[in-house]
Image (tube, grey):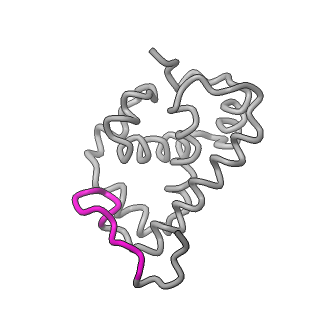
Amino acid sequence: MLVTQEANVPPLVEGTPYAALPQSDFYRSLIIHEVVHAVMHQNLKRPALSQATYEYPAYALQIESLAPSVRDLFLQSFNQRALKANSIFSDSTLLFDPYFFAARAYLHFKASADGCSLLAAILEGEVSFIAPPM
């Protein structure tokens, strides 16, 4: 379906961290998310073993693409201590709480001295911060 008028775009789902974001900002970030999927898919050296491997870069760069004030609004939706916990990324977290996964992916990506090296490692299939599938 092609949406030609912003008034025809349905509202974001209430009760989710995205609901508080301006709609246009959210949808722009969603385009980034999908473009990252396409670029990563075209450049993977071997198939990813988990869904978390595909989603980590897409979510990290989606949240990065938000304006700082909008990004902060999104990140404030979460328990800050839980967000900063140094735990591995997994399909379980992604499936149970994709919003939390997105926030953690962004913070992990930004905490790296070289985020591009994280993306390159994902493309090579050599990351230690994403759990293999169970």
Residue most extreme to the top: 134
Please tell me whether the stretch drawn in magenta is mainly helix, strand or loop: loop
Residue 46 picture quarter: top right
The percent coordinates of residue 57 (x first, y second) are 58, 43
Question: What residue appears at the point 36 percent right and 72 percent down from the top-left corner?
Answer: 10
Does the magenta segment cover residue 52?
no
Question: What residue appears at the point 29 percent right and 62 percent down from the top-left corner?
Answer: 13
Relative to 104, is 50 on the left or the right?
Answer: right
Toward the viewer: 13 or 58? 13
Q: Quadrant of the C terminus?
A: top left
Q: Which residues are magenta?
A: 8-19
The percent coordinates of residue 98 (x first, y second) are 38, 43
Residue most extreme to the front: 1
> Is 24 drawn above or below residue 118 in the view shown?
below
Question: What residue appears at the point 41 percent right and 75 percent down from the top-left corner?
Answer: 9
> Is 14 drawn above or below residue 4 in the view shown?
above
The percent coordinates of residue 27 (x first, y second) are 49, 67
> Is 11 drawn above or below residue 39 in the view shown?
below
Does the magenta segment cover residue 12?
yes
Relative to 114, is 98 on the left or the right?
Answer: left
Number of numbered markers: 0
Question: What residue appears at the point 43 percent right and 62 percent down from the top-left corner?
Answer: 71
Toward the viewer: 4 or 119? 4
The percent coordinates of residue 126 (x first, y second) are 67, 22
